[in-house]
Image: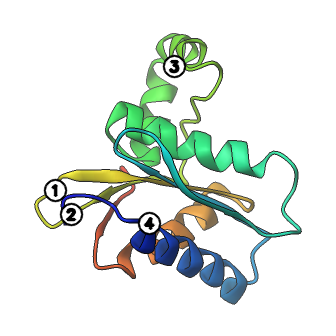
Amino acid sequence: MHKLTLETAETMVDVALAEGDRLGLQPLCVAVLDTGGHLLVLKRNEHASLLRPQIATGKAASVLGMGFGGRELARRADLMPAFFNALSDLTGGHMLPVPGGVLIRNSHGEILGALGISGDTSDNDELCAIAGVTATGLTCDTGAS
């Protein structure tokens, strides 16, 4: 696969939301962006709080913009806070260097897009992101070393 399709993105989102329900997590919101940063799918549990769509989209955009997963973003933000403050300014406040934002890669390692989840803890959000991406046969890059 060289391009992320709407059908594949919908599957990722539906599986991620179902995983959150299965685990008994707080209500989630999931966003999938293509390689150009354009929103393909966004679904929000009707009980998720007001800012969840912006947070989920911000997590996805952050990893896509920097080219590595949320865990690596978090590590780098801890080491270089001034740089990440500047990145936040450059992105209009949309830089979210935390787990829950993952890159979507094909079997050749090419980036096809990104998925972001918000609603529970960042670690739990990431678990659901992994479930959603891997259910499609694609690779989920969390930024874990």
Q: Mark 4 points at which residue?
A: 6
Q: Is residue 4 left or right of residue 115?
A: left
Q: How far apart are marks 4 and 3 (CA)?
A: 31 Å
Q: What element carries label 1?
A: loop
Residue 84's disc number? 3
Chain-order first, disc 2 or disc 3: 3
Q: Specify the amino acid type for callout 2.
A: Asn
Number of residues whose C-alpha sits closer than 10 Å to that of mark 1, classed few (under 14), some (14–19) or many (20 or more): few
Q: Find numbered disc 3 in the image and state the secondary structure of the residue it sits on.
A: helix
Q: Spatial distance from mark 2 to mark 3, Cα to Cα?
A: 28 Å
Q: What residue type is labelled 4?
A: Leu
Label placed on residue 106:
2
Q: Earlier in the sequence, mark 4 or mark 3?
A: 4
In terms of depth relative to the viewer, which is nearer, 63 or 39? Answer: 39
User: Of marks 2 and 4, which one's residue comes earlier in the chain?
Assistant: 4
Query: How far apart are the two marked residues, 4 and 1, measured between alpha carbons?
Result: 20 Å
Estimate the spatial distance between the alpha carbons at disc 1 and disc 2, rounded to whole Å: 5 Å
SS for callout 2: loop
State which mark lies toward you, 2 or 4.
4
Residue 114 location in percent, x, y?
42, 52
Q: Residue furthest front?
A: 6
Residue annotated with mark 1: 109
Contact, mark 1 vs mark 2 (Cβ under 8 Å): yes
Q: Nearer the viewer, mark 3 or mark 1?
A: 1
